[in-house]
Amino acid sequence: MTRYLFKRLISLIASLVAASLVIFAMIEVIPGDPAAYMLGLNAAPDTVAALRDSLGLNQSLPLRYLGWITGMMTGDFGISYTYKVPVADLVAARLTVSLPLALMALLLSTAIALPIGILAAARRGRATDLAAMGATQLGIAVPNFWFAMLLVLVFAIHWRLFPAGGFPGWANPAEALRALTLPAIALALPQAAILARVLRSALIETLGQDYIRTARAKGLSRRQTLTRHALRNALIPVLTILGMQFSFLLAGAIIIENVFYIPGLGRLIFQAITQRDLIVVESVVMILVFAVILVTFLTDLAYASADPRLRTPR
């Protein structure tokens, strides 16, 4: 297990280094001058030059990269060009919204998908299976922003059960959770559809294995065989999807956050791109990449826990 863990750590570090180089290079080749954009079209050239110097934009690219990556390693993500505050403070404030939203959506998608996937696999080929797979196909095909607008029309405007947008902060946790409920549902439904289909396929494949037939021959019922033996062995592809979904829900909720006007990380990236606040874009994207790679690393550890064969060196 130690050797497996060491190899995964080396892979994580290499992925982070490669991602930082790609992110920095992609941001730096974007045309335009951030200093000139911030000061406007009528700004004097000497004022623009002074701002470029204060922002460190006159340094060579290798020095700027080393300064940026060294600062990130010590928790200093730089100062936002637009907001004039540390990027770390911006990210921390937005994470208090995006992280609970992603966790709520992941829990909802899992709670929806697991019973649907198990039920569909247990009743393969029957009407229940066909209805469940039809519903999941619809959930995959329909965009989540359409779900979001439909939820607003029904639950916010018509029934007035939840707010249509905005976030009141965590001073009142009950109101904060109410504000995140509809966005979490809009994010969770398409992900639940994907997860349910993957679980059904994994369970059906597992139920055809020899050890499942042996368990049935020893007198276990189909339900006992499904829950005690097949479900655990079908978890590896499910864990893969769960890891990918959490990364997507944390980093890819830009549309939903804009539909509900939620001040999360996705909305911060959108605003930073439109304002050419490059240090915010670089830092937030790098943080999200780190989150994705870390979740992948933890998912690999979960693989090894679920299937001991993965820990055995070959």
Image: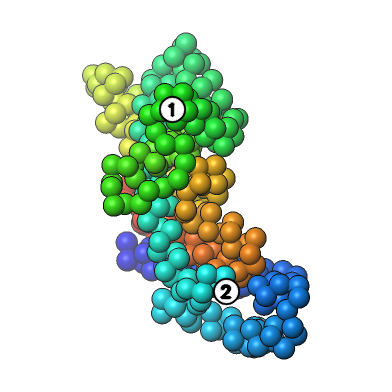
Q: Which of 200 and 114 is in front in this view?
A: 114
* Mark 1–mark 2 CB contact (< 8 Å): no
Q: Where is residue 26 in the image (x, y as percent from the top left)?
A: 67, 68
Which quarter of the picture shows residue 48? Answer: bottom right
Seen from the viewer's position, the closer of residues 123 and 221 is 123
* Picture coordinates of residue 192, whole percent (x, y): 45, 34
> What crowding class fits label 1: few (fewer than 14 Cα within 10 Å), some (14-19), or many (20 or more)?
some
Tally of numbered tags = 2
Label 2: how many Cα within 10 Å (few below 14, some 14–19, many 20+): many
Colouring: rainbow
Q: Which residue is drawn at 49% across and 57% down?
A: 265
For this view, does 18 lie left or right of residue 237? Answer: right
Q: Looking at the figure, which quarter contains the C terminus?
A: bottom left
Q: From this view, report whether residue 225 is shown above or below residue 99.
A: above
The answer to whether residue 303 of the structure is visible from this angle is no
The kind of secondary structure element at disc 1 is helix
- Disc 1 and disc 2: Cα gap in Å? 39 Å
Relative to 78, does residue 261 appear above or below in the rendering? above
State the image coordinates of residue 254 (x, y, percent, origin top left): 55, 49
**Amino acid type, label 2:** Tyr
In this view, the residue farthest toward the top is 127
Looking at numbered disc 1 in the image, what kind of residue is underneath it? Phe
| Residue depicted at x 64% and y 84% | 51
Please tell me in which quadrant of the rendered image residue 119 appears: top left
Residue 145 seen from this side: yes
Residue that carries the numbered disc 1 in the rendered image: 155
- Given residues 55 and 302, the one toward you in this image is 55
| Label placed on residue 119 | none
**Relative to residue 224, is residue 104 depicted above or below?**
below
Can you identify the residue that label 2 sits on? 81
Residue depicted at 28% across the width and 47% down the height:
172
